[in-house]
Image (spheres, rainbow, N blue to C red):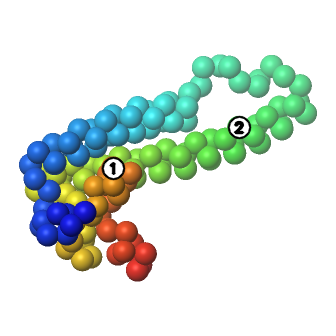
Amino acid sequence: MTEEKTKTRYSDHELVEFKQLLNEKLDKAQRDYNILKSALSHSDGNDIMDTSPTFKVLEEGAMVLSREETGKLAQRQQKFIHHLQGALIRIENKTYGICRETGKLISKERLRAVPHATLTIDAKKAQ
């Protein structure tokens, strides 16, 4: 831990490790986003057109709610992808892992848990 306090940036070797982690998370996030996007535009005819009118009204209400929730999830996933891509750019610029508020190194533990973090825990708490 003391080593991280005196360093001004992570080594190229450490950045490669973080880049691998970020790419894995990005691949999964993009797969998840594509699934959500597919669910939003999915119309395979497996709907409620052939059911009773009462059930149809209830089912349509649930379907609209589900589409809204799926849309919100897709938006959040897209934002997460954007943050991961930003972190990859910071790796290329060799500024990854440096707190944007304090200029100190963000702990490896925090970056492993939240690889797109731009603030140390202390800076995040201060917000």
Residue at the (33%, 55%) spot, across then down: 109
The answer to whether 96 is drawn above or below residue 35 in the figure is below
Q: Nearer the viewer, residue 65 or 88?
A: 88
Residue under label 2, please give it.
63
At mark 1, the secondary structure is: helix
User: Residue 72 placed where, x, y %?
Assistant: 55, 50
Asked whether, in this view, residue 88 is left or right of residue 115, the answer is left
Measured as percent of width and height from the top left, residue 57 is found at: 83, 37
- Residue drawn at x 76%, y 25% is 48
Q: Is residue 98 visible?
A: no
* Of 116 and 7, the residue lying toward us: 7
Q: Disc 1 marks which amino acid? A: Arg
Q: Going by the picture, which residue comes out furthest to the bottom? A: 126
Extreme residue toward the front, this view: 2
What residue do we see at 31% from left, 68% from top? 119
Q: Is residue 119 above or below residue 52?
A: below
- Residue 59: percent from left, percent from top: 79, 34
Assign the N terminus to one quadrant of the image.
bottom left
Label 2 element class: helix
Q: Earlier in the sequence, mark 1 or mark 2?
A: 2
Q: Is residue 35 left or right of residue 93?
A: right
Please say if 90 is above or below 48: below
Q: Residue at x 26, y 48 (%)?
A: 85
Residue 36 appears in the picture as rendered: yes
Residue designated by label 1: 112
Residue 82 image position (x, y, % from top left) = 32, 51
- Measured along the vertical axis of the image, is residue 43 above or below residue 7? above
Q: Amino acid at mark 2?
A: Met
Label 2, residues with CA under 10 Å away: few <14, some 14-19, many ≥20 = some
Q: In the image, 100: left or right of 48?
A: left
**Labels 1 & 2 near each other (Cβ < 8 A):** no
